[in-house]
Image (cartoon, rainbow, N blue to C red):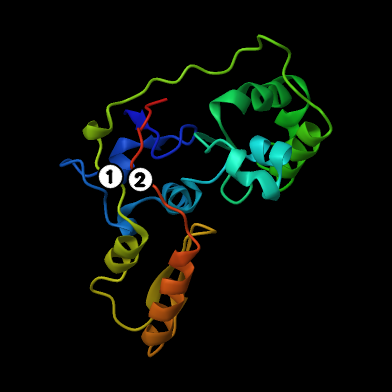
Amino acid sequence: MAKVSIGLRGWRFEESEVFTESEEFKPLDEVPEDARRRLIRLSYLVGKPCDACYLVHGEAEKRRCNQAAIVYGEPMEEVLLCADHEADFLYWYREAGGREFRGEEEFRDEFHEWFADGGRAPEGYGGLEHVETDPSELPSPPDPDELNRRLNENYGGKRKRIDFESGTVTYDEPGAEADDEDDSAEAMDDVDIDFDREYPTK
């Protein structure tokens, strides 16, 4: 089965798990839990700055940061990187002990500490080769409002709600819909989402 990245390189999805035969996104209830969490989380991460750039420039100079193009690690502990800093991360992971934190809560923090202390890849250290795919070959991901709407189609009783920051689905009590709509609108103001980007296949 073919694997694809969506929005950011790094996380790979089985096409059959997230897309229908007509190349549309499947309803979230039909997407396996891990893939669903990553897909939701990506809607929050796309457009965020590279972690390494942010460590260099800080909040005051955030505008100088490159936009992240790559994501490594598990949801909520992932590392976001631009192409310029991918080699630094790979060196840390392969050669400087980063591998031992794979799957651990400290994964991101350990990389940040190493990088902030001056850790860098040697000059010429190679990254990974990524194959770009024409974005027209894949449908654009549904936006957060559409994800919420589709998740709650044909459901009575408790209403499902997506936490885009954590990538999880929670349940609200009946009768709370009005408050949820207000909360969703406020949450969306804080989410910087840009789906007009290329979708690499590796």
Instruction: Pick whichever, 201 or 50, lies toward us.
Output: 50
The amino acid type found where label 1 is placed reads: Ser
Counting residues from the start of the chain, the first of labels 2 and 1 encountered is 1
Q: Are the residues tagged 2 and 1 within 8 Å (C-beta)? A: yes
The residue furthest bottom is 175
Percent position of residue 187, x then y: 48, 68
Residue under circle 2?
A: 195
Residue corresponding to mark 1: 140
Residue drawn 21% across the image and 44% down it: 20
Q: Position of residue 194 (x, y in %)?
A: 39, 47
Quadrant location, the N terminus: top left
Indicate the quadrant containing the C terminus: top left, top right, bottom left or bottom right.
top left
Q: Is residue 76 visible?
A: yes
Other residues around mark 1 within 10 Å, as few (<14) / some (14–19) / many (≥20): some
In which quadrant of the rendered view does residue 22 lie? top left
Quick one: label 2, few (<14), some, or many (20+) residues within 10 Å?
some
Residue 55: give x, y in percent of width and height.
72, 40
